[in-house]
Amino acid sequence: MRQIPLGLELDLDPGFDSFFAGPNAEAVGHLRGLHVDAPPTPLYLWGEAGSGKTHLLRALAQQMHAEGAQVGWFDAAAPQPWTFHEGWRLLVLDDCDAFDAVQQQAAFALFIEATTHGTLVASAGALPPVDLPLRDDLRSRLGWGHVFHLMPLPEGDCRAVLRREADRRGIFLSDEVMTYLLTRFARDLGSLMELLERLDRFALAEKRSVSVPLLRRMMAEGGA
């Protein structure tokens, strides 16, 4: 279990300002509008890996935390037992599609406790609620409120995000390097950001500017 602010092992760095909304502006706008005094209508985000589900849940947790609220965070990697805290204003259930039988039972109990105490529940998974491989009572509750499908960014938006992050790091990304990244590697932003971070570290260690040959060398030495 990860609890905010009592347990600060959860990285709260990702915020709304660092998320490129693109085709997901409606979902981002809804989440930005949620505050500690908001009606506790559940919400669920779904989309493929790298679409930004966890980023947005962390951004929401960060927003609530900044307003003095406590947050409970549970995902498929969280150890048992999962216990509800009456002081929480937000309960997050991430990676719902990966919950095993024990976690599903615990998540259902948490959901009931949260709704009883007027706590907002925000959850996410790779599939829409109706298709989740979960017990019926939990699946139906995850789909009770607002459901948003996070769409992958088109290539133009991916280029804009890469360019913005590279500029922030002080890296010059030529069009050649950008095209190489987008045509030879997974295009989801999570993977691209990790790759850019690796490339930044490698270029600094080698004291070389970023180029396609340097990228190829990094991949050859470190594995794809």
Image (cartoon, rainbow, N blue to C red):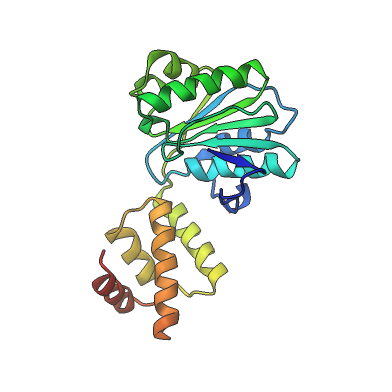
Locate residue 198: give its quadrant: bottom left
Q: Is residue 139 rendered to the left or right of residue 44?
A: left
Q: Is residue 27 rendered to the left or right of residue 149?
A: right
Q: How many marks?
A: 0
- Does 140 sit above or below residue 11? above
- Does 45 sit above or below residue 108? below
Residue at 65%, 24% in the rendered image:
119
Residue at 65%, 38% in the rendered image:
32
Frontmost residue, 138 versus 34: 138
Q: Is residue 46 rendered to the left or right of residue 115?
A: left
Res. 209 in view: no
Q: Quadrant of the C terminus?
A: bottom left
* Residue 52 position in % (x across, y down): 47, 44
* Residue 88 position in % (x across, y down): 67, 31
Q: Is residue 10 rendered to the left or right of residue 217?
A: right
Residue at 68%, 37% in the rendered image:
70
Which residue occupies the extreme bottom position in the image? 207
Residue at 67%, 33% in the rendered image:
34
Res. 122 in view: yes
* Residue 44 position in % (x across, y down): 51, 28
* Residue 97 position in % (x across, y down): 37, 30
